[in-house]
Image (cartoon, grey):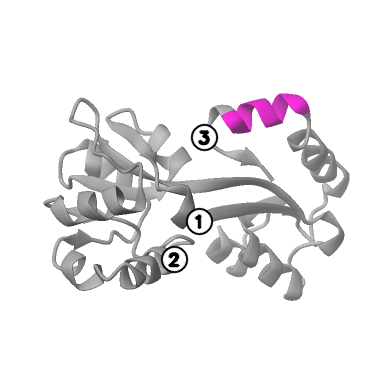
Amino acid sequence: MKRRIEAGESFDLAVLVNFQTDEMIKKGKLEADTRSDIMKAGIGVAVRRGTKVPDIGTVEAFKHTLLDAKSITYLKEGASTIYLDRLFARMGIAEALRAKTVKPETETVSEAVAAGAVELGLIVIPNILSVSGAQLAGPIPEEIQSYIVFTEAVAATSPNQQAARELISFLKSPAAISAIRAKGMNPG
């Protein structure tokens, strides 16, 4: 979405990763006074539905599960990518994972797991829950979890400023918060 905004596509409201929203505010593309953290999502582990769910309940179990996996996948470029690359380096397993890691250019991590193309996928939990052939093995352990914060703001050039502001208010309402939780995220 950030690329589409930068390319000049018209829109009324953007929901981006928090640092992208801040960047678009600095560039004058979004209204600063409408910036609002709407939800956050943790990183989870996806397995193919119907397969054995691996133990990822502790940092050590998570590490062994990654090392024992035949293949893993996570985004080539994304909010969680830099974090995972650094995490694996800190854990001392980056080199061992390199040869068996597939990093797609698009958000097809859960789809690749569902198709059986890779054994484990690492991506934000809502992405896993949205793919019927993928199953959430669980979130990565809390001690090493990273949350991706999604932030909304109104387009500076929107002809529908009031409606976009009302949508922001709605997305903070109890009904929206319930839906956000149902999709595997926490309210911002």
Where does residue 16 sit, x and y in percent of width and height? 61, 56
Q: Main secondary structure of the magenta part?
A: helix
**Of residues 133 and 53, the one drawn nearer to the viewer in this rendering:** 53
Q: Is residue 184 left or right of residue 132?
A: right
Image quadrant where residue 170 sits: top right
- Distance, label 3 to label 1, CA atoms, is 14 Å
Q: Is residue 116 left or right of residue 157?
A: left
Where does residue 45 sit, x and y in percent of width and height? 34, 44
Q: Are marks 2 and 1 in contact (CB under 8 Å)?
A: yes
Image quadrant where residue 134 sits: top left
Please tell me which of labels 3 and 1 falls first in the chain: 1
Which residue shows up at 82% across the image and 38% down it? 169
Q: Is residue 122 left or right of residue 24?
A: left
Where does residue 159 sit, x and y in percent of width and height? 82, 51
Residue 177: in magenta span: yes
Q: Which residues are magenta?
A: 174-181
Q: Give the foreground label among 3 and 1.
A: 1
Q: Considering the image in quadrants, where does the N terminus appear?
A: bottom right
Which residue shows up at 35% across the image and 41% down it? 57
Q: Which amino acid is tagged 3?
A: Gly
- Distance, label 2 to label 3, CA atoms, is 20 Å
Residue 86 seen anywhere in this rendered image of the structure? yes
- Distance, label 2 to label 1, CA atoms, is 7 Å
Give the crowd class for mark 2: few <14, some 14-19, many >=20 residues within 10 Å: some
Query: Circle 3 is placed at which residue position?
Result: 184
Query: Circle 2 is placed at which residue position?
Result: 83
Callout 2 secondary element = helix
Query: Circle 1 is placed at which residue position?
Result: 146
